[in-house]
Image (cartoon, rainbow, N blue to C red):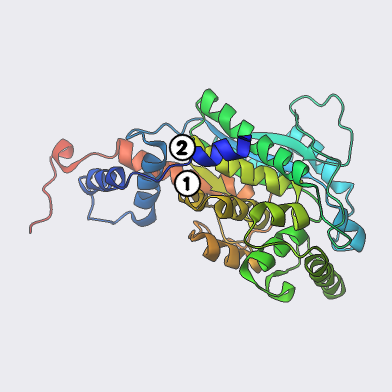
């Protein structure tokens, strides 16, 4: 069996009894029933995913996967592809948005080169997992080979397995790759049966003319490659991205290892969508950090069945929304673990 097959076989349904037991514990805290709203939901979910009634989220990691995209040559982005390695170096130096917000959340950022068209050579802190020097132009043929897609999925799975060994309690997804909203839009268009116009937005801030070029490139890629929406691996291979594949692998690996995973925005959710199509129960292990400004994101979230935690008009990526959402997930767990019960506090409970 391949690593993907063995990982899929390890993903198990969540224990609904544990979910209910956790809610009973929350109901005994010094508060009206359900009064902490979604914080209670977060606590229930972390306990049920981890299988641990007293989960420890002190170790948190955001993986920012970097990859380039051949479709950039169609003129779909406001920035040249050289920005991808430049931003990787910025993240390594701690100067990017994800670094700032991860420090605020008490999370570590680990940046992974899974497909950047650049030789980083000796870069301290960079995780070298390059599968290829970017994808090919999806408007002219398949973005990658099936073997490349499987190799990128394996990158994410192996990192999740390492997180289990390292005792990481909460994992976040992030990405860096100029042009990566184009394959993300193509993925949701193919899976959901939408037109490119319905699910394609401005990415890095492109103008109206470039938006039409982007939509045309996606339509051309879908018409030419004819990805099978019933075969997530075929879809990923034909119109996906290497960092999207690695995110999908990370989600599957976290699900197999019972680690809750916080999915960032549009591109990260494209990876989570592929993972959920490969194994429907993978979605039970996800937290959707936020709803992006990208119009296709809502369709992805609906397909996965995830309600976003935040709505802040974000569209940066990198894992920034995931870092912000980690605060609230951890807050919910702390309510469960640290808030006094009625009995402990000597507070009278509500009269029937």
Residue 261 lies, with reference to residue 128, above or below; the image says below
- Pointer 2: what residue? 258
- Element assignment for label 2: loop
- Pointer 1: what residue? 285
Quarter of image, res 313: bottom right
Rendered residue at 28%/56% (across/down) = 34
Discs 2, 1 touching: Cβ within 8 Å: yes
Residue 337 locus on image (x, y percent): 32, 36
Q: Relative to 313, is 72 on the left or the right?
A: right
Of the pair 211 and 114, the residue shown nearer to us: 114
Q: Relative to 284, is 171 on the left or the right?
A: right
Residue 83 locus on image (x, y percent): 86, 47
Assess disc 2: are there few (<14), some (14-19) or many (≥20) residues with their C-alpha within 10 Å of its C-alpha: many
Residue 243 locus on image (x, y percent): 72, 45
Image quadrant where one finds the C terminus: bottom left
Image quadrant where one finds the N terminus: top right
Of the pair 215 and 139, the residue shown nearer to us: 139
Quarter of image, res 221: bottom right
Outermost residue on the left side: it is 352
Of the pair 223 and 205, the residue shown nearer to us: 223
Rendered residue at 34%/33% (across/down) = 54
Q: Alpha carbon of mark 2 to alpha carbon of mark 1: how far? A: 7 Å
Rendered residue at 16%/43% (across/down) = 342
Q: Relative to 71, is 173 on the left or the right?
A: left
The mark tally for this picture is 2
- Element assignment for label 1: helix
Residue 38 lies, with reference to residue 193, above or below; the image says above
């Amino acid at each position: 069996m391949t690593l993907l097959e063995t990982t899929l076989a390890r993903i198990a349904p969540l224990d609904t009894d544990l979910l209910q037991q956790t809610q009973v514990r929350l109901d005994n805290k010094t508060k009206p029933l359900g009064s902490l709203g979604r914080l209670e939901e977060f606590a229930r979910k972390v306990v049920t995913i981890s299988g641990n009634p007293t989960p420890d989220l002190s170790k948190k990691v955001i993986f920012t996967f970097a990859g380039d995209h051949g479709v950039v040559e169609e003129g779909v982005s406001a920035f040249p592809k050289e920005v991808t390695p430049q931003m990787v170096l910025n993240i390594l130096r701690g100067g990017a948005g994800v670094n700032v917000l991860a420090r605020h959340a008490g999370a570590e950022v680990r940046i992974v080169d899974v497909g950047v068209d650049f030789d980083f050579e000796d870069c301290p802190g960079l995780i070298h997992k390059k599968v290829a020097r970017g994808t090919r132009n999806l408007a002219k043929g398949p973005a990658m080979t099936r073997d490349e897609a499987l190799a990128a999925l394996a990158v994410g799975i192996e990192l999740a397995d390492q997180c289990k060994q390292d005792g990481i309690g909460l994992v976040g997804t992030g990405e860096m790759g100029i042009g990566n909203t184009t394959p993300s839009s193509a993925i949701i268009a193919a899976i959901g049966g939408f037109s490119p116009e319905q699910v394609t937005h401005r990415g890095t801030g492109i103008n109206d003319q470039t938006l039409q070029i982007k939509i045309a490139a996606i339509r051309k890629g879908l018409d030419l490659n004819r990805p099978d929406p019933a075969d997530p691996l075929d879809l990923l291979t034909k119109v996906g991205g290497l960092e999207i594949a690695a995110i999908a692998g990370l989600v599957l690996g976290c699900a197999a290892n019972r680690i809750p995973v916080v999915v960032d925005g549009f591109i990260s959710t494209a990876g989570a969508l592929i993972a959920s199509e490969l194994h429907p129960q993978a979605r039970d292990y996800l937290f959707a950090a936020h709803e992006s400004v990208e119009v296709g994101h809502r369709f992805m979230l609906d397909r996965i069945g995830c309600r976003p935690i935040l709505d802040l008009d974000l569209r940066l990526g990198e894992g920034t929304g995931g870092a912000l959402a980690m605060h609230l997930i951890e807050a919910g767990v702390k309510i469960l673990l640290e808030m006094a019960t009625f009995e402990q506090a000597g507070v009278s409970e509500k009269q029937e």
